[in-house]
Image (tube, rainbow, N blue to C red):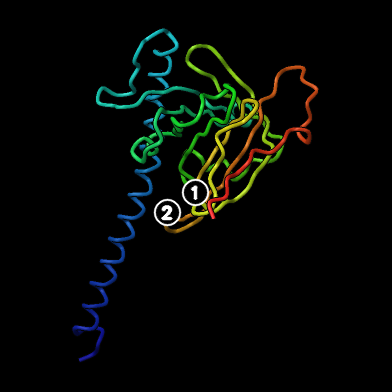
Amino acid sequence: MSWRTGWGWRALQAATLVLLAVGFVCVGEAAWIHVKAYVAQVAIARAWHRAQAGAPDAKPWPWADTRPIARLTAGQGAHELMVLEGSNGRNLAFGPTHDPASVLPGERGNSVIQGHRDTHFAFLRDLRIGDTLRVDLADGRSSSFAIVDLRIVDSRRWRIALDADAPRLTLVTCYPFDAVRSGGPLRMVVTAAAISEGSSTTIGSIPLLRFAYLG
């Protein structure tokens, strides 16, 4: 009996079907992550508009334990993202999140916003020194920032300093962007300093944000 007509052929067919099923599951899961990220941003944007209209606790969905606190714009409007309050893993699935230990964007100090490398913050890989970012708050305040530093750090040995003499904005995501498995220790950190219209400040004159060495 040829292996093509015996148990060997049937085993090969079964293994092929299993591999195809696993592949479909992986592709479907990846697609669902992106769909969820997009749909959530739509719902969060609606809550954001309610907050702008004066709603005291504008939640994106009835059971949400978070709310939108800012709108982040990069690349002259090419990337517009709603930022959620609270930097836990659950909220990160729906959008970038503001670290509550840091100040609000535009206030004196360093405001830290985190996002996933494969969805909302995938565009960070294309940012360059001198690029501008804009952050709008629901109360009408807005701030513009210029990127002054891009670096990769090991989160086991370094942490971002939250104190600053002027308004700063720091965007953080996992690194590398094409990693097969998430949860590694490396982070891409984008540091931006506040700028104002008509300001004569140059990027080179802005001191870089300090990092604290953990040993």
Tally of marks:
2
Q: What percent of the width, then of the height, locates residue 115?
A: 47, 39
Q: Is residue 83 left or right of residue 201?
A: left
Residue drawn 25% across the image and 73% down it = 13
Residue drawn 38% across the image and 49% down it = 30
The residue tagged 1 is 174
Looking at the image, is mark 1 or mark 2 earlier in the sequence?
1
- Residue type at tag 1: Cys
Question: Residue 170 or 126: which is nearer the viewer?
Answer: 170
The residue tagged 2 is 182
Residue situated furthest top in the rendering: 54
- Residue type at tag 2: Ser
Q: What percent of the width, then of the height, locates residue 78?
A: 59, 31
206 over 13 or under it: above or below: above
User: SS class of the residue under badge 1?
Assistant: strand
Q: Quadrant of the C terminus?
A: bottom right
Q: Quadrant of the N terminus?
A: bottom left
CA gap, disc 1 and disc 2: 8 Å
Question: Residue 63 or 155: which is nearer the viewer?
Answer: 155
- Other-residue count near label 1 (Cα within 10 Å), few / some / many at <14 / 14–19 / ≥20: many
Q: What percent of the width, then of the height, locates residue 73?
A: 57, 27
Q: Is residue 105 left or right of residue 5?
A: right
**Circles 1 and 2 in contact, beta carbons < 8 Å:** yes
Q: Is residue 153 left or right of residue 132?
A: left
